[in-house]
Amino acid sequence: MIDADARSNEDLSVSVSDDEVVIRATIDRPDRHNALNENVMSGLYDALEAADEGPARVVVVRGAEGTFCSGGDLTEMAQLVDAGPQAYRDQLSSISVLMRSMRETDALVVAAVEGYCLAGGMGVATAADIVVAADDATFGTPEKESGLFPMQAMAPIMRTVHEKKGLKLLFTGEKFDAATADELGLVSELVPAEAFDEELDDLVDTLANSSPTMISMGKEAYYHQQGMDFAESLAYLREMFALLVMSEDTEEGLNARLMDEEPDWRVR
């Protein structure tokens, strides 16, 4: 059983659905526009770890009070100036581990974006598998205003948007609306702000009502084949499909369809 209280901290709240298939992690630093700090990043990592240790199929990441995340906490970063480069490396390793874990966890990670989604926050959002955004959300990588560059956020962003479009965004630091983010391919689904929670819950319910084996193998296959050439990708995906067909979940799903029943997607 997932202990939500044990996974929460003063800057991140975690809740778990009754059947434990959905974990919701909410960045709770509204006074800092939900900026990333060590508590937030370690808490998100713990939530992803909990998903892999239990039956969770979906992890929802969002921000409290209508703001997703404004990026790294600049106040904390400024305090490291006198500590030297290694102190920055240690801090930055946390967001690297977090974004990598979002891609490597067996569960689908959904970023629920409202309000500002900026800098490292945009990196976290684009590291998610699916991004649901309110139509009044604001995106951008404004690090240049502080003489910085979105080095780590660039990894998921530039794997999502076209090269020339992405480079312009990174170097101009311009903020842009949710409709533009949708056009650029940064958003999976754009929904009216007034219906955000309802639309988000509908999507999460659809995703959660799926075979956990299908989710984990499908996600692994998608990201693994990205670096392959076409022929290599086809060969790899053929093998993954063969393994999936032999799974207990596929047996359950096929039998349920033949019997015109709902499949029982329990953890096997």
Image (cartoon, rainbow, N blue to C red):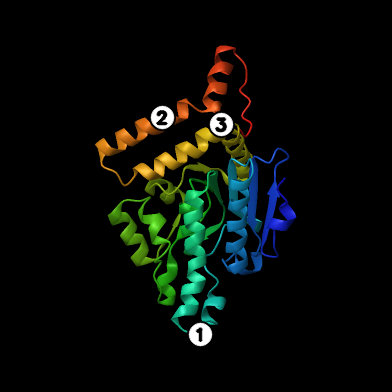
Camera-side mark, 1 or 2: 2
Secondary structure at numbered mark 3: loop
Along the polypeptide, which appears first: circle 3 or circle 1?
1
Task: Tell me which amino acid carries mark 1.
Answer: Ala
Quadrant location, the C terminus: top right
Residue at the spot 46% in from the left edge and 25% down from the top edge: 245
Q: Indicate the position of residue 140 as horizontal and vertical percent values.
A: 44, 61
Quadrant for residue 194, please give it. top right
Q: Which residue is mark 1?
A: 83
Q: Quote the CA–CA distance across marks 3 and 2.
A: 14 Å
**Label annotation for residue 211:** 3
Task: Tell me which amino acid carries mark 3.
Answer: Ser
Q: Which residue is mark 2?
A: 241
Q: Indicate the position of residue 90 as horizontal and vertical percent values.
A: 50, 73
Along the polypeptide, which appears first: circle 1 or circle 2?
1
Secondary structure at numbered mark 1: helix
Residue at the spot 52% in from the left edge and 53% down from the top edge: 137
Secondary structure at numbered mark 2: helix
**Residue 118 shows in the view:** no
Q: Indicate the position of residue 107 as horizontal and vertical percent values.
A: 55, 43
